[in-house]
Amino acid sequence: MVKGADWLLKSAEKIGLSLGIPPFIIGVTIIGIGTSFPELISSIAAVFKGVTEIVPANAIGSNIANILLIVGISAVIGRRLVVTKSLIDLDLPLLAISTALFLGAAWDQKITLIESLFLMFSYGIYLLYTFLHKDERADEIYEVLPARPDRRKLRVDKLGERTQAKRPKIGAVDFILLAVGIVGLAFGAKYLIDSVVKLSELLKIGAGVISLAAVALGTSLPELLVSAKAAWQKKSEVALGNIFGSNVFNILVVVGFPGLFKTLHLDAQTFHLGLPVLLVATFLFIISGISRKIHIWEGAMYLMVYAFFIGKLFGLF
């Protein structure tokens, strides 16, 4: 499923550039949305399989893993992550508001159609706000895109915006990869959800518990790869910007879109453990962001909190 998402995004990006779509718009789509494709597709599959508790558990678990595990690992690898001014001014408040909206929707242990519509509408506002402030963050988002030879043909004009001197050529292979990526995502999501349901029966634990841990971790692999590589290359804004966009997408769209089809329910573990840990993790992330730097010791603390969460989830202590 993760590889399917990778093929889908790479081919879609190249096709988009060849059609003349501005690189900034492609960047927002790929970084803010693309790395969360596995969460979205697996959540849609869960709804149609009738195991709706997987959806919020997947989103909550992914956000917890993104902050505590991925930012933690990135801070340890990079030894220190520097938070840029635009992340503090734009992304921190948006992440805080999005998390608050989601907590409000999930407070009665279910997410209804009206609440799902509200979450989707909120994401539309988020995208609009992002586009209105594109001049402040175009370079940051663009840097996240994986480097390939066709990007050498991009130049910076006098307005500071990325423009394309020559569009990349596309062939049949790009469309084949696009189709294979979509098929890979669909089949991967189906077998993932089937496996979660079967494991839940075999181990006699809730599907939500497996989703909070294993599924959330598995679907967060794209974020982990992007952020860890960025931290190693000392590109803090890339490592952190990837997490902001992904977390907002998870709690607004990964939950909101499947909720348009069925009412989503939160199981006991997700509600009593997942939600409080999500709140704590987001609070720690915001505090670290305001301080402008995330040090190696903070990264180590994040990892310890994540280990405690997993241990508590499976009743180890």
Image: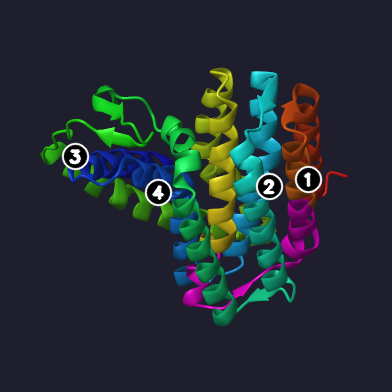
Viewer-proximal residue among 26 and 191: 26
Q: Residues within 10 Å of mark 1 (few under 14, many from 20)?
A: many
> Could you tell me which secondary element the residue under label 1 belongs to?
helix
Q: Which mark is residue 309?
A: 1
Give how far across and how far down residue 235 sits, in percent. 55, 24
Confirm whether the magenta stretch covers residue 277.
yes
- The answer to which of marks 4 and 2 sits earlier in the sequence is 4
Q: Amino acid at mark 1?
A: Phe
Quarter of the image that includes the N terminus: top left
Residue 282 shown left or right of residue 95 in the figure: right
Circles 1 and 2 in contact, beta carbons < 8 Å = yes
Callout 2 secondary element? helix
Q: CA distance from mark 4 to mark 2?
A: 22 Å
Q: For the residue carrying disc 4, how many other residues have a C-alpha within 10 Å: few (<14), some (14-19), or many (20+)?
A: some
Q: Is residue 27 left or right of residue 239?
A: left
Q: Residue at x 56, y 81 (%)?
A: 114
